[in-house]
Amino acid sequence: MTTPHLPATETRRGTGRLLLLGAAGLGLVLVVGCWYLLKGDPDISLSELGRSLFGGHTHDNGAYLVREVRLPRLLLALIAGAALGLAGTVLQYTLKNPIADPGILGMSQAAAFVVALSVLFPGLMPRLVLPVVCILAGLATSAILVVLAKSIRDPVRLLLVGVVIASLGATLTSATIVLLPIDRAVGLGQFFGFTAGTVASASWSRIGLILPWLVVAVPAALLSGRALNLLQLGDDMAIGRGMRVTRARALLLTCACLLVAPVVAVVGPISFVALLSPHVAKVVLRTSNAHLVLPASAVVGAVVMLLADTAGRLLFFPTEIPAGIWTIVVVGPLAVVLARRSVGRTSMEAS
Amino acid sequence: MTASPLAPPAVRAKARPLGRRADARSRRWRWFAPTMLVAVLVLVVVSVLFGDNFRISPSDLLHWLTGQSGVDPLAKFGINTRLPRALLAVLVGAALAVAGALLQALTRNPLASPDIIGVSQGVVAAVLVFSVIFPNMPYAYVDWIQPICGTVGGIGTAAVIHLATRKLGSAESTQFILIGILVGGILTSLSSLALLFLGSDATRVFGFMSGSLNLKGWSDLRLAAAYLVPGLVLLVLALPRANALQLGDDVALGLGQRLGRDRLLVLGASVLLTAGAVTVVGALSFVGLMAPHMVRRMVGSDLRRLVPASALMGAVIVLVADLAARNIQPQRYLSGLGDAIGFAYLPTGLYLAVLGVPFMISLIWRRS
């Protein structure tokens, strides 16, 4: 692992912490995941859970519940969280901005607009195509960012372009809804449920919808550490090190899109997981080496999503609260607190 | 133009136009202000005369204005629906534009505006959360509680941003804007959550979320006017101080300004103006950013000229956008889609976004 600007000892210590974080994350996922699978309506016993997971062909209700409802939901939460965490790191390093997030840059809004069209005009696009169109919409916004990044060196200005695109996307979505005839408004409830972001409608087929994209994008993101580290040094330094900056940025943003858009298409625009994860990862690892932050942020994202969905499902038990609400109400303020430190640092560098 | 009598002497001396360029600007201001004033008047009259389904003859308007009897009742009805809406457009456009100009002076960053740093979103979120918590409140109460709620939301948002950035050192505009964007993002998500709980009522508030003047009447105009008064008072107090802040912390300190207090005053004026406008018509975006930019090249960045000029320009922008919103009937142009399109007018905010997005992107691009 060659990192151009970091001393080897720091990297080694960071690797140790990463392993610790991974172990802690795994333990948390196992414990909370077990509880997640056991509790609900109806509760099932531990032995029943064991039988339904590893027992081969059992066909009782408990086994069906675990295999077809709770397990896919748990996996979807983990996958979505990990993808968002990774995407957050890629975006924040690529745009050199500590508050870059697919929801702030307009990628989520673009994808949500596509989903709004598909929900409100049923029959417009088949379900299989939806993630593809979402990815295309996300790619369109990133294309604007990549093109403008050539001439806009200031990370804050670049982020503002994203903010503008995001507000355009949101306005287009509300215009679509305003134009909806009254008798079509039945789809609205479904759409609002979607905008909150929830994994409640998980199923194996839905996981199948996003998995192909993630199979490509997750390894690509995990391997992009070197490029992210170089971009972090600034465009001039990166060019000096032989990097083709614009091409790298385009590839990285494409990768982020591939991570975010399918998740938005299936789970909804989950906010702030992508923003928070890299910051938590950096605090825990005490390094900003992208090689280490990338996997760490994936772990953090997965854990955060799992906790959010567990809280949403079980905290106020009979009523279910979408995971997206927890990410807004709890993760959002937390992200502000954590991002504040890096924001201070960014502006000092900029000035 | 003479200096405002409220300006402390030191500031007045500093801000007095110097040299040939400043002279040219004050000359330009002398014809720019009346021109804009006439433009606003013409647009208001046009807004009243032209409407979706019928035109009102100028003579009817003249008769109505002079209080003569014998005005066609239909024309009377038309005037009574269109005139308050046009005047409201003037009011909120001016308020938002001034709020933007103040914020840009405060942060010394030309890309600040109330809808970018999250104040507008705070107002909208507060109003929506309020209507989720008290869904069945009678309209008589809603009318006066809702603006209070929205104002509190806007002030709360600004307070959070202020507190979060205060300890990070001097008033770094970048920090202020970044934290503001972040807070705004959270509040936007909060608003979309409120939609989930509003359920079937949600269609009602979509116009509010992107800013709409649909169905606004005299009572809304009175409400907006009343809620803009405190902001206006603060504006008068803040104006000379904002001018000093604009020159930089060191200069402002050297001029004997008390930085912390002045900054709060300017921020407060901007927030109250934003809240007063947004609680009534919703989060009209881009006005606060566009208007000061459009006039800055004409009148310079002396706030005593920039603020009134921005106000006029903001009024013109919102009037134009609302004229489009009132007269473009999407169903007519999208008839190819058949019954997929309902009979509705698009919110004013959409036309503002159509104007504002290219403007803003080109602005960000050009300045880098």
Image: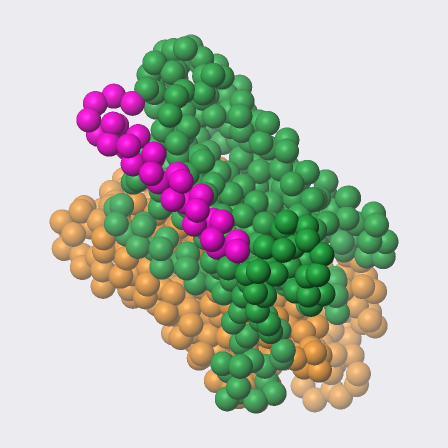
Chain colours: A orange, B green
Q: Is residue A57 above or below residue A182?
A: below
- Secondary structure that dominates the magenta span: helix
Q: Residue at x 49, y 49 (%)?
A: B41
Q: Residue at x 56, y 51 (%)?
A: B89
In the figure, is residue A242 to the left or right of A159? left
In the figure, is residue A178 to the left or right of A8? right
Q: Which quarter of the figure is the N terminus of chain A placed in? A: bottom left
B124 inside magenta stretch:
no
Q: Residue at x 57, y 65 (%)?
A: B57
Q: Is residue B257 above or below residue A56?
A: above
In the figure, is residue B115 to the left or right of B64? left
- Position of residue A121 measured from the top left corner of the image (x, y, whole percent): 58, 83
- Position of residue B283 measured from the top left corner of the image (x, y, whole percent): 57, 52
- Position of residue A279 measured from the top left corner of the image (x, y, whole percent): 47, 46
Quarter residue B295 falls in: top left
What stretch of residues is rendered in magenta? B17-45
Number of numbered tags placed on the structure image:
0
